[in-house]
Amino acid sequence: MTISPTDQKWSAKSYVENAGFVSDLSEDVVRLLAPQPGEKILDLGCGDGRLTEQLIDVGCDVVAIDASADMVASCKDKHIDAYVADGQNFELNQKFDATFSNAALHWMPDYDGVIKSVSNHLNQGGRFVAEFGGFANIAAIVTALSAAANKFDGDAALACPWFFPTEEFYALALEKHGFEVVTMERVSRITPLPTGIKGWLSVFRPSFFEQFDQEIQQDVLDYVVQLLEPSLQDEQGNWWADYARLRFYAKKS
Ligand code: BEZ
């Protein structure tokens, strides 16, 4: 079986159970967006739609897109105007005052495609406001997965399918596409994992473990957990993730 590094399966239900904190921790980026009633906003990589609902509650006219049909179905259940689309190359035939994105851009390694598509859909002076994983995000987790791939003869590329750029790199990419970067920061945010590291891995990296024969998958998981215990488990047994967020506000000039 061949598994592509970015081959990610999503279940809206499992996401809510194991990673509901992703929307809970979005206050800063929503504040940076400062959505106003009546604004037309594109939510790029909307996930289960919890944040999209917040923007709608403010009085914004929101369109949401996500690559996962399961996530889009969950949005539609919430009466959100949502579509399955690839954030790296989309065409919606409408323009927006702002594009918003939380915890999604690190799944889109074609950053040029993302920025170009966003620019094509913004009105002049429109803003692109987002938060996602920046350089050194979840470094301990990626290192443990890579070590497990080496030990069990797996594919180390499956340990890190994500794009975690530095602030300098992403700012240049935005400027290249005609954006003025108003703010760009990278913030370390050690984050509690309500269902532990196993819950996190089951949502975000199932395909890493599925590359191994079924009989050894538990051994691989146990090895990863053992490697991570000293750095990500506290003295009370709680698990944390070593997140580093890139957060920016850019204007189409
Ligand atoms: C993040 O939000 O930074 C993230 C989540 C899942 C996998 C990788 C990164």
Image: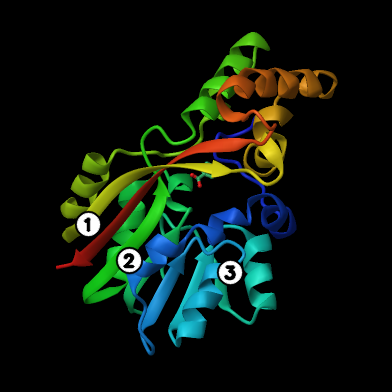
Q: Nearer the viewer, residue 12 or 19?
A: 19
Are circles 1 and 2 on residues that touch, CB within 8 Å?
yes
SS category of the residue bearing label 3: helix
* First in residue order: circle 3 vs circle 1: 3
Look at label 3 and name its amino acid: Arg
- The quadrant in which the C terminus is found is bottom left
Q: Nearer the viewer, residue 11 or 35?
A: 35
Considering only vertical position in the picture, is 110 above or below 228? Answer: below
Residue at the location (59% across, 44% down)?
Answer: 192
Determine crowd level at label 3: few under 14, some 14-19, many 20+ residues with C-alpha closer than 10 A. some
Q: Which residue is mark 1?
A: 183
Indicate the position of residue 176 as horizontal and vertical percent values: 17, 51
Left or right, 19 with respect to 168, comes to right
Q: Quadrant of residue 98?
A: bottom left
SS category of the residue bearing label 2: helix
* First in residue order: circle 2 vs circle 3: 2
- Is the CB atom of the residue marked by disc 3 within 8 angstroms of ligand 1's nearest atom? no
Indicate the position of residue 26 as horizontal and vertical percent values: 47, 60
Query: Nearer the viewer's eye, disc 2 or disc 3?
Result: 2
Look at label 1 and name its amino acid: Thr
Q: Nearer the viewer, residue 60 or 238?
A: 238
- The quadrant in which the N terminus is found is top right
Task: Indicate which disc residue 50 carries.
Answer: 3
* Cα distance between the residues tagged 1 and 2: 9 Å
Determine crowd level at label 2: few under 14, some 14-19, many 20+ residues with C-alpha closer than 10 A. some
SS category of the residue bearing label 1: strand
Residue at the location (78% across, 18% down)?
Answer: 219
Look at label 2 and name its amino acid: Leu
Q: As drawn, which residue projects farthest toward the front?
A: 235
Residue at the location (85% across, 20% down)?
Answer: 215
The answer to whether residue 246 is seen in the rendering is yes
